[in-house]
Image (spheres, helix red, strand yellow):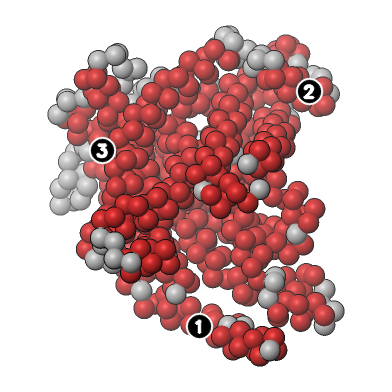
Amino acid sequence: MGRFIAKRLGLSLITLLLVSIIVFAISDVLPGDVGRSILGRSATDAQVAQLDHQLGYDKPLPARYWKLVSGYATGDWGTSPVLNTEVRPLVLRRFGNSLILAAFAFALIVPFSIFMGIVAALHHSRWPDRLISIGGLSLIALPEFVTGVILLVVFAVQLGWFPSSSQVPTASPVDWFRQLLLPSIPLMCVLFGYIARMARAGTVDSLRADYTRTATLKGLPRRTVVRKHVLRNSLLPTISVVSVQIGYLVGGLVVVETLFAYPGIGSLAYDSVQANDITMIEAIVLFTAVLYMLSNLVADILYAALNPRVRLAS
Amino acid sequence: MSAAVDAATAVATPTPTRGRRASELGRAVVRSRTFLFGAAILGFWILDALFWRAIVPHDPSATSTDILVGPSGDHLLGTDNLGRDVFSRVLAGATPVLTVAPLATLIGLVGGTAIGLVAGYHRGLVDDVISRIVDAFLAFPAIVIALLALTVLGSSQVTVILVIGILFTPIIGRTVRSAVLVEREREYVAAARLRGDSAPYVMLAEILPNVTGPIAVEGTVRLGYAIFAAATLSFLGVGLQIPSPDWGLTVAVERVNLSANPWTVLGPAIALATVVVAVNLVADGVRQAVEE
């Protein structure tokens, strides 16, 4: 187990190095002239040269890459030339807000999706299965902005039940639902499809497994077979799919936060794109990539810890 | 004894010949009701994308003084803020979506198949290096890295296709690699190697035809994601630009007019949803046929 964790950590470090090189290549090398791309065509050459110098873009590439890496390693994520503020506190504060929205969506949809996935598997190929599978497939297919716009029109604009721009909720649970329910529904639609599908596939597999047949043949009641033998094994793959969804979620947050004007990391990404604020987008991309890697690492270790075949193999 | 066992397994799992496998797959796909239903809807949109000029009741870019009127006999879905016919724009909007998404998927399929074949066939150091790079790409939330790349590169139909295609390459590469890992242990690969066939020949002529199933599944699934991603990027303003009738862009631009004529937004939104659902149904049909 210790060796397994050490190996996964080592691989993550290599991935992290490559991630930083990719981000550096896109944001620092690809544009050619960063100052020009921030200031636009109307700026004079002198203004561009000054901004390049101010941001350090007149230095050679290895020096710039080292500055990026050492900056992030020591907690200096740079200063946004557009907003004139330090990047790190803003990204972290916005991330905290997004976490509230994402946690709200996860808390509502993960148990529900797993439950529906299991229901579908227990009624394999009969109408509840068809209904849940096709429903999930259709919900995955709906881009968040499509669901989001429709919800916004019906429940915020026409009926006025919810605010059309959501704020960070206060401590009151009523306010949580008022502010967060509408923006989290588009996320939940997509998440439901993935998680229910995975829970269903895992349950179908373990229903067919030999140990389930043995349990049935030795005369255990179906309830016991399902609870003690099927579900324990079927939920393992679901853990990894839930962690993979964190990567998806960031993309989904960009859309719903923009649509509902929620002050999270997604709307920050959108605003930075509109303002050509490459320093800020760079920080958001790196931050979310590291976050995603960490969540995968945790999921892998959790998976190994729960699965005796992996736990005991090393 | 061991020869008998070998003979038995050889009979039990005959190496499928190329031609038979492809036609069997084709027949299994066509038998699937899910596939046919999805293919019918998708077929409608493909025909529309090609021939919308012949069927639109109005010129989709012609403005008029009838601004934001509701649905009527003349304007089935009413008009938008510039007085353009919403129904005609919805019909014309299929073309950009069905251009960007298939081309991006194609780039991802070609690139992903290439790196998957090389990584899976060679194993060892080559595989390790490719796998680490793939991992690094998969660590990025696709929409966010696409935002960064398109901000830097500038938005156009070509850059959107390239960015989505490049982001798909490692994902498809990973799927192809795991399929190749299984195939390379088969006897026909060993036979080709013993015969002295070169590595590129074994990969392209021996292994590739036997991994078309997983590639077909991955390709159709990715096509759905490509439509989803392209529409989302257009909605976020870094995809196709005004005055394209692109659906994602239209939803973004027209959402301020929702209360005046909701069809300006609902029209393209519903059209987009039907295309993505259709592609997913097709993908599901292909997946079931391959798994059978």
Image quadrant where residue A154 sits: top left
Taking A86 as reference, is B139 above or below it?
below
Amino acid type at mark 3? Ile
Residue at the image position 31 percent from the left and 17 percent from the top: A169
The secondary structure type at the circle numbered 3 is: helix
- Of residues B114 and B257, the one nearer the viewer is B114
Q: Where is residue A251 in the image (x, y as percent from the top left)?
A: 47, 36
Residue at the image position 58 percent from the left and 21 percent from the top: A280
Amino acid type at mark 2? Trp
Taking A64 as reference, is A213 above or below it?
below
Of the 4 image quadrants, the one containing the N terminus of chain A is: top right
- For disc 1, the marked residue is B23
How packed mark 3 is, by other alpha carbons closer than 10 Å (few <14, some 14-19, many 20 or more), is some
On residue A66, the disc is 2
- Of residues A138 and B66, the one nearer the viewer is A138
- For disc 3, the marked residue is A150
Q: Where is residue A260 in the image (x, y as percent from the top left)?
A: 33, 26
Q: Where is residue A257 in the image (x, y as percent from the top left)?
A: 39, 27
Which is nearer the N-term, disc 3 or disc 2? 2
* Whether residue B144 is visible: yes
How packed mark 2 is, by other alpha carbons closer than 10 Å (few <14, some 14-19, many 20 or more), is few
Q: How far apart are marks 1 and 3 (CA)?
A: 43 Å
The secondary structure type at the circle numbered 1 is: helix
Q: Is residue B13 left or right of residue B278?
A: right
Discs 1 and 2 carry the same chain letter: no
